[in-house]
Structures are given as C-alpha cells and as structure tokens.
Amino acid sequence: SQTIHQWPATLVQPVGSPLSLECTVEGTSNPNLYWYRQAAGRGLQLLFYSVGIGQISSEVPQNLSASRPQDRQFILSSKKLLLSDSGFYLCAWISDPSEAFFGQGTRLTVV
Amino acid sequence: AQSVTQPDIHITVSEGASLELRCNYSYGATPYLFWYVQSPGQGLQLLLKYFSGDTLVQGIKGFEAEFKRSQSSFNLRKPSVHWSDAAEYFCAVGAGSGGSNYKLTFGKGTLLTVNP
C-alpha cells in the first residue's frame, strides 16, 4: 500500500541551529514530492517540489533548502534556523492530479 | 499560475446551523478542486474533490461542494453543523499536466468555530 512517513512530529530548535526533516514514501516509484509550510495566518505555502532524484524546484526564496538523495526520500534542511522558520511542515506525495497523500506533519518551534 | 482565495478567515456558527465556506480560484482551465480539513494538531484530511462531471460533489462527514465555472467558485456546504466540525478548512486547486509542472495550491484557510 502507499504510505508517506514524516518525522519528527515535533521539534524545538534554537535560533542558529541546523535543521533536517525527512520524508519517505512507500508503495511507489518516482513520486512527485512536495514540502509545504503552514505558518500562522498564512495557510499552506508550497516551499519545494521534486519530480526525481536530485531535481528540486523552489517556490519561494527563504532560509531553507531541499534535497532528493533517493527516489523515495525528500529532505528539508536549514544551516541556521531563524525565528521565522517556525511553523507546521507537511510533506506531500502527489501520485496523479486526483490523488495527494500527506504526512502527519512536523511542528517546528524555533526559540 | 493558479491561485486560491478563501475570503473568510474565521467563521462562527451555532451547532445545528447551516454552513457555507467560500472558495474562489484562478486558473485558465478547469482545475482539480479539493477541500481539506485540519483538526488542531493534526494533518490534512480530504473531504471531497472535483475533477469533472456533476458539479455538486458529495464528501465525507456530510459535506458537499458545488463547482460553479461562471463564478470560479467551489464553495463547501453542510446543512447542519456538529461541534466536532470545528477545525480549519482549506480549499485547494491542482493544476498542470503532471510531471514537472503539477502543483497543488492551497488557500489560506478558514477557521470554523462551533458554538453550543
């Protein structure tokens, strides 16, 4: 079956520290993968998407980066976190235009 | 590029009252349209979706939505709201031909409060 895993569920990090959030999918190959962020009052904003290994498209300029080291792995990173990076991060796998699967999300608080 | 507008940031209704959440989209053709619900601290749950055919779509938990091409709208409705419906609701538009240019764009959400 098709599943998407995202971890950790919650994270509290100090300003200036690095970040690595991981998303993996099962039950498919060559998925389109997406990272969204939900900040207070901002809705769900698309940050990055990837259509294959090593292929990353960035939607908004920011302090974050993404990588696709393996077909079913999508990583969101930062070298130095800012307070404004706090939010709820969702990984999504869209298998076709009619179907989207979401991870359970990571609540990141930068202090 | 597609965009989604949810004009109401916060709506409060009484339990048992009817509900309508508004959603307008911008896209050159008919997109894929979705409504998601997010309960506090939870991920997203799909309520319903529209691709083609009957413009009135039935979803889970008693929700329905109607696609109106002339108004570029996809409003969500429920005839009688339950306290458990209190959550944040997101309208989303999926557009593109797949491959490298398919994107799912969300509105900013509408927070629903249900009064007893």
Image: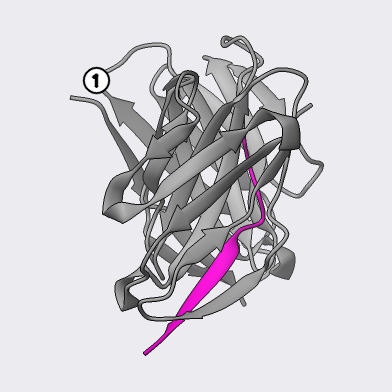
Residue B88: x %, y % from top left: 50, 64
Q: Secondary structure at mark 1?
A: loop
Residue B91: x, y in percent? 57, 46
| Predominant SS along the magenta part | strand
Res B48 quadrant in image = top left
Q: Position of residue A31 (x, y in %)?
A: 43, 17
Q: Nearer the viewer, residue A84 or B71?
A: B71
B69 sits left or right of A96 in the view: right
Query: Residue B113 magenta-drawn?
Result: yes
Q: Is residue B115 magenta?
A: yes
Tell me the amino acid under the disc marked 1: Gly
Residue A10 as seen in the image, left or right of residue B99: left
Name which residue lies at 32% across and 40% down.
A5
Residue that carries the numbered disc 1 in the rendered image: A27
Q: Residue at x 57, y 58 (%)?
A: B21
Q: How many marks?
A: 1
**Can you give x and y, in whole percent of width and height, for residue A43 in the image?**
64, 56
The answer to whether residue A21 of the structure is visible from this angle is no
Q: Quadrant of the N terminus of chain A?
A: top left
Residues in magenta?
B105-116
Instruction: Name the chain under label 1.
Output: A
| Residue at image location 51% in from the left, 72% down from the top | B112
**Nearer-the-camera pick, B35 or A60:** B35
